[in-house]
Image (spheres, coloured by chain):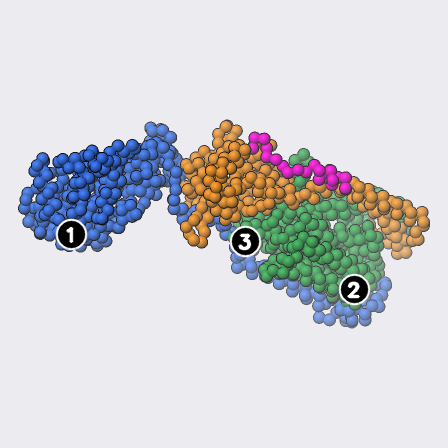
Amino acid sequence: MPNDLRVEKLTIAEHLEKSGVSRRSFIQLCTALMVTAPVGLTLTSKANAFDVAKAVGKARRPSVIWLHFQDCTGCSETLLRTSRPDIADLILNVISLDYHETLMAASGYQAEAALKQAVEENFGKFVLVVEGSIPTKDNGQYMLLAGKPALQVLREVGSKAAAIVAMGSCASWGGVPAADPNPTGAQGVDSIITEKPVVNIPGCPTNPYNLLAVVLEYATMGRLPALDQYNRPKFAFDRLVHDHCPRRAHFDAGRFVKEFGDEGHRQGWCLYKMGCKGPVTHAACSTRHFNEVPDVWPIGIGAPCVGCTEKATAFRVPIFQTVDIHAVTPPEALPLINTPVGTIGTAAAAMAGIIAGGIGGAALMASKRLPTGKETEKAESGSQDGRPDLTGKSGGN
Amino acid sequence: MALTRRDALIRLTAGTAGAVATGAASTAVLSHSAQAEERPAPPINAVAMLYDNTKCVGCQTCVAACADANKLGPNRKVDALYRTNRDLNWTTKNIIKLYKPADGKSYSYVKQQCMHCIDPACVAGCMFKGLRKDVKTGVVTWNAKVCVGCRYCEIACPYHIPKFQWEGFNPNIVKCEFCKERLAQGLQPACTSVCPTHAVIFGSREEMLAEAKRRIQESPGKYYQDRVYGEREGGGTQVLYLSKVPFANLGLPELPDESVPEKYLKWQKRVYSYLAVPAVLYASVVGVIRNTWKQHQEEMAEEEKQTGLRPQL
Amino acid sequence: MIDTWERDVPVYDVPIWTRPFAVLCGLSVVALGLVTYRELAGLGPASGMNDAYAWGIWKTFNTMVLTGLGSGAFSIGIAAWLFKRSRLHVVMRTALLTSFLAYFSGLMLLGVDVGRPWNFYWVFTPWRWNLHSPLLEVAVCMPAYAMIPLLLENVPPVLDWVHAHRPQYRPVVETAERIMVRFYPFIVGLAYLLPAMHQSSLGALMLLGGDRVHPLWQTPWLPLLYVWAAGFMGFSCVAGTILFCSLAWKRPIDLDVLTEMNRITAGLIGSWLAFRVADLLFSGKLGLAFAFNIFAGLFWVEVIFLGVAILMLLDSAKKRDARLMFHGHLVAAVGGMLYRFDPTTLAFQPRAGAFYFPTPVELLISVGFVSIAIAAFMYVVKVLPILPAPTGLWYRMEKEHKWTQDREVGASFVAAD
C-alpha cells in the first residue's frame, strides 16, 4: 500500500476527488451501494443516490485489517466476486484495507512490519476482519504466524480493534477445522475475544454482500447492524433458508427430488429428501444468490443446502441426511378448527316471520268466530232433520 | 250389547293369552339379542394411520397428494384461491387445520379426514349399506350405486366427516376412503406416502398402536395425557392421533368408549330383532280389532235399518 | 250449530273455488316450480342446508313433524278400534284423509330433499337393507303405510261416490266393499302397527345424533316419546281441523264427540308430560332445565304449551266451549310440533360455529307442500263424504239432488257378512 494513503484523514468524497474519480462515477457507486445493500441498513432508507452520496461522502474510510488463520481463503475469494462495489472500488474508495495477506504486495518481514504499523497507526479505530478459525490446543501451537501462535496474534490485534468481524463459518464458530474430532482445538473468534463487539458472518463461504453491508453500515453510520443472539447480523440471518426458498411451493405440494438427475431434479423440485438443510439453516442465500447471477446458489443449481452457516449442522450432520423441521410459522391461509357455516338472510327471516304471523293470524281470526261456552248453551237445542239454524244467534265477529 | 259370561271369559282369556304371549316373545327376543351383542372388534387386517402433531409442520403436502390421488379438482366456488378450503367439503377429503390458542404462540396442527371407526355411526345409519366397512381392512367406503343422498351419515358422524355435494344434479357423499385403490395395489395411501416429516404414517392398526405407545413411553409428558386418541374413543378408530395439546382443541371430541351405534341403537336393534316384537304386536292388535269389527258391523247394520242409508265403511 | 254427528257428509253447499283455495293452489304451484329449480341447481342453491346441519326443514318439519300431526288415523283409530270408543268412528274418515294428505305431502317433499332419489328403488330389495338403521325402518314403513293401509282405508269414500254417481259400477263397488270387509281387521291392524313402528323410528333417528342432541331431549326413550306425541298431535290436528271446517262452512258441532276427544287428548298429553319429566328426573338431567340458556328456554316453552293445553282442553270439555277447544288443540299441536322439531334442529349442535336457517326458496317449498295437502283436503271434503255431520244434513243433501241413494235396505255390504 502506498504510504500516503494508509492513514486516511480525508473524507471519502475528498479522497475520491483527489483520486480523480468523477462525481458521476461516485454517484454511480452510491446507486450501486443503495441497490445492493441489504434491507435493514440505514443506507437503504435513503431516498436516492444523492442522499447516499451525501452520507457516504461525509464518512471517512475506515481502516480494515484482515487476518487469516485456519482458512481456505474462500471468504476472500468470495469478496472478489462482487461488482457493486467491486473489490477495487471497495478497497480504494470505501475502506482502507491496511493489511490483507492475500491481496497485499508485501510478504515476509515487510508483511510483519506492515501489520505492526497498521495496528499502531489505527489504534482503537480499525475494524478487524478475521477469516479462518483459531487453533487453541496445546497453546495454539498448530498455527504460527511469523513464529507467533495465531491465538496470540488474534489477542494482540483484536484487543486494539474497534470492532471485529468474523468472516465465514470458520471464524464464526470453528467451521471445517472444528469438525470432529477437532484435533487442533479450532474455535471461532467470539469464544476467544469476549470484550470486543464481534459480528459473526457465518457461511462457507458467506455471501460477500453480507460483509459489505456490515462494513458499509459501519463506514457510513459508524455503527454495527442489529445482531441476533449468536451475534449474526439480523438482516441476513434472521430467517431460515426454507422460509424463503424459491422451491418452497414444491415442498408444500410434495414434489421432491428422489435421485439426482431424475425428472423432479430436472424440473427443479424440492431437495428436502436429498438432505437439504434449508429448514434448519439461517442464511440469506435463498434471496441473495452468489456471483451476481440469479439462481447461482446451492439449491438453485440443484444441490441440497448443507447448512454451512450453522454450527450444529455443517460438517456434522451428513449432507444427504434429512433433518427434522421445527418452528415453522403457520401460513395465514390455514383454516381454523371450527369454520363458521350457515347464515340467516334478511329475506329468509322476514319470510319466516310472515309465514308464522300469517298462520297465527288466521288461527286467531278463525277462533274468534267459534262459539264460546255461553253461546253454546244457548244454542244447545239443535234440530235433528234439515239444516240447523246457524245464522244470527251466536258466533259474533 | 250385554256381555254373556261365556263371551267375557273368552275375551279375558284371549286378552291375557295375547298379553302373555307378547311379553314372553318380547323378553325372549330381547334377551337373546342382548346376549348376542358385544363390542365390535377391529377387523383382522385393520389398516391404520398414526398422526403425530408434534411432527407436523403444516406444509399441506398431504392435502395436495390426496387431491391428486383422488382426482379432486379445486373448488373455485368456495374460495377464489386454489384449494384454500376452509373445511372438508366435497372436493377435499383431507385437510390440515390450525389450532391457534389465545396466546398466539403454542399453535398446533391437526389433520382431518375420515376416522374409519371400528363401529362407524355412518354405517349404522345408512339405509342401504351405501357406506360400508370392509371386513378385512376396515376401510369405510361409499357406494354411489346405492346411496340415496339422504345425508343421515352427516347427522350420525360424531367427527362431522362425510360431506355432501351441495351443487349440481348428481351429488356425491365425499370422504376419505383410505385410498383403497392404492391399497389394493399394495401402495400406501397418498397422504402417508408423501409426508416429508413422517408426521402421518401408515401400517396395521396393531403396528400403529404399538408405535404410538412406544413414542409415549419414550417421551413421557410430551403428549397430551400420554394417550393415543382413537384407541378406545367412540369404540375405537383406525386413524390414531398423538397430540401435544388437548384433543378437544383440535376438534376431536372426547367420546366415551361406547360407539354411537352401540350406545344409542341398543334398544332399536333389540326391539326389531327378527321382527318378533312387531309380529306379536300385530297378532294381538288384529285379534282385538276383529272383535271390535264385529261389534261395529252390528252397529252399522242397526244404523242402516234406522236411517235407510248405506253404511259408511 | 250443536248437533250429534252420525254420518260423514261432503261439504256440498260451498263452491270449490274460494279465495283461500285459490291462494293455496297458487302457493302449491309456486312450490312445484321451485322444486324444478332445486332439481336443476342442486340442494345448495335451493336451501340453507350445509354440512353441519345436513337436514333442513323439509326433512325435519314437513316429514318428521307434520306426519306427527298426520297421525290422527293412527291415534284416533286406536282409540276407536282397540279401546272401543265407538263414538269416534264418525271422525275416522277425517282423520284418515288428513293423515293421508300429511303423509303424502311429507313423503313427496322427502323425495325432493334427498340428493339421489333415483336410487330409492333399493327399498324393494331386502338383501340390501341395513336392518340396524332407523332410517331404513322409516323409509320402508312410511311409504308402505301410506300406500297400503292408509290408502285402502281412504278408498271407501271414493267407493261411496262411485256408488252414488256412477250406478253402472255399483256391482264393482259392492264386490270391492265385500273384499274389504273380509280383510278389514288385517288392514286396520297394519294401520296401527306400521305407524307405531315408524313414528317411533322417526324418534330413533335422532338417537344417532348422540351427544350432539342436547341432553334435555336426547334419551333412549326418544322413540317412545315421539310416537306418544304423535298420538296426541293426531287428535289435536283432527279436532282442530273439524272445528275449523265447521266454522268455515257452517257445519254443526257435536260437543259430545269433541269433549271425548278433548279428554283423551288431555290424558295423552298429561301422561306424556309426566313420563318426559320422570325420564329427565331419573337420568339426573332435570337440573339442565334450570340453566339460563336457550335450551332450557325451549324446554319450558314446550312444557308450558302442553301444560296449558291440558288445562284448556279439560276446561273447554267441561264448559263445552268450542272456541276454547280450538285454542286448546292449537296449543297442544304447537307444543307437540315443537317437541318433535327441537331435537332435530334447535337442540342439535353438531359443532361450534355451525348455524342453519332456511332460505326463502326452502321456506316457500315447505309452505307450498303444506298448501298442497290443505288444498287437496279442501277439495276432497267438498266432493267426498268425509266430514262428520248429523244425518239430517245428508237428507238435506239428497233433497238438493247431490247424491242419489239406493234405498234398498239390505243391499249393502254389511248385511252380506
Residue at the image position 79 percent from the left and 46 percent from the top: C188
Residue B263 circle label: none
The image shows residue A47 at horizontal and vertical percentages of: 21, 54
Instruction: Please say whether residue B86 is visible from this viewpoint.
Output: no
The image shows residue B189 at horizontal and vertical percentages of: 49, 34
Disc 3 designates what residue?
Answer: C355
Q: Quadrant of the C terminus of chain C?
A: top right
Check disc 2 and give the amino acid type. Ala
Disc 1 designates what residue?
Answer: A56
Eye-nearest disc, 3 or 1: 1
Image quadrant in which you'd find residue C12: bottom right
Q: Chain of mark 3?
A: C
Check disc 3 and give the amino acid type. Phe
Q: What is the span of residues highlighted in magenta in the rendered image?
A: B26-47
Q: Is mark 3 in CB contact (under 8 Å) with mark 2?
A: no
Disc 2 designates what residue?
Answer: C317
Neighbour tally class for label 2: few under 14, some 14-19, many 20 plus, Cα within 10 Å: many
Residue at the image position 56 percent from the left and 35 percent from the top: B139
User: Can you tell which chain is drawn orange?
Assistant: B
Q: Colour of chain A?
A: blue
Check disc 1 and give the amino acid type. Val
Judge if badges 3 and 2 mark residues of a common chain: yes
